[in-house]
Image (spheres, helix red, strand yellow):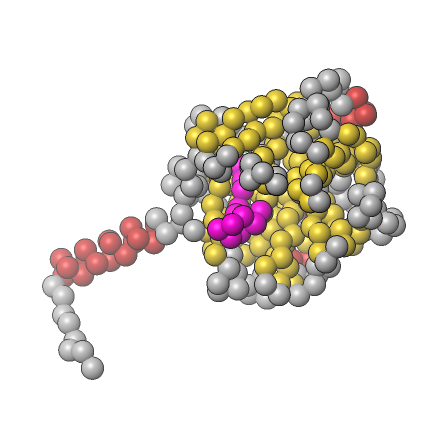
Amino acid sequence: MPPKMYFSAPLKAFAVTLSAVVFAHAVVGPGKVTGDIAVHDPTMCKDSTGKYWVFSTGTGLDIRTSTDRTAWTRVGVVWPNGAPWTDAYTNTTNGVLWAPDCTYANGEFNLYYAASTFGSQKSAVFFAKSKTGLPGSWTNYGLVTSTAKGNNYNAIDPNLIIDNGDWYLSIGSFWTGIKEMTLSSSTGKPTSGTVTSIAQRTANSGAIEASVIYKYGTYYYLFTSWDLCCKGTSSTYNIRVGRSSSVKGPFADKSNVPLMNGGGTLVLGTHDSIIGPGGQDLFTDSDGPILVYHYYTSTGSNLGINRLDFSSGWPVVI
């Protein structure tokens, strides 16, 4: 047994201060990214050549590419000639489209995206495909689902998970929270009108959105963004998670609080100069699980990329 060590009062104070500093900086910041990184609600996928693609919110949906996951170049938009089929939901011609979700499978890009106006339930999710991912190469496969005033949820923020060949789409924002539906793998559209609730909050006006279901090991992890985005350095977005042994839930957080009862373990929140991280996506690369998100600084909204460590059974930003 090692001998006891005694410290003077000044050394004790130094130890306490050092401990506080270490704790304050325990959260890892975004990895290095360069180039055009002014994104919002990013989604990442990787094609068969090893090129990385980020699609994000914008007029026509912004496209950025990288060969190393570090240096990014904006190459255009998905719909350079506009997307008139979405105009009824954006209440404008060639309006901003929201929160795309990209999955590269079987040699093609599958893209889900939303059209809405801020704070409205007049919202819709659409589906498109491309062999190359390049601007103007996309085929519109039309409406997937929609909501209107009077519905108890909001059809935005789509995210696809393919599990053993079966397709599931999670959507939702505020109101009664996050929903899930089963899709046809051949059409990319719902197989029925059944919509299942998988996460809900009542706190902060029910602020939960940007769902992602990600499988790691034997668990399915449901990531969401809580609180408020889109307010620059006043944003309070933060990323939360729960898990389940089934893609359909029920999901619970690390303290075993059901996500349907407001549960959610913090993954990443405001720290240092990184404000309001959220609007996330998850992606598996050769070096493991990757968390992709936006965050705010005084200069605007930026691309954040971090690796995740699931060795404890829960995701930790590294």
**Residue at the image point whose x is 53% and y is 64% from the top:** 313
User: Would you place residue 212 above or below residue 260 in this image?
Assistant: above
- Residue 248 position in % (x across, y down): 73, 59
Q: Residue furthest front?
A: 49
Residue in the image at 41% along x and 43% along y: 29
Q: Could you say where residue 289 lies in the image, as x and y percent from the top left?
A: 53, 51
User: Looking at the picture, does residue 224 appear above or below residue 57?
Assistant: below
Picture layout, residue 92 above or below residue 54: above
Q: Residue 117: x, y in percent?
A: 72, 28
**Count of numbered tags:** 0
Residue 301 seen in the figure:
no
What is the x, y in percent for residue 68?
47, 37
Q: Is residue 281 magenta?
A: no
Instruction: Name the residue: 74% across, 48% down.
Output: 169
Res 41 quadrant in image: top right
In the rendered image of this protein, does residue 126 appear above or below residue 215? above
Residue 290 vs residue 261: left or right? left
Q: Could you say which is closer to the camera, residue 284 or residue 83?
A: 284
Q: Which quarter of the image is occupied by the N terminus?
A: bottom left
Can residue 39 be seen here?
A: yes
Q: Residue furthest right?
A: 192
The magenta region covers 283-294
Query: Which residue shows up at 30% across the image and 53% down it?
Result: 22
Q: Quadrant of residue 40?
A: top right
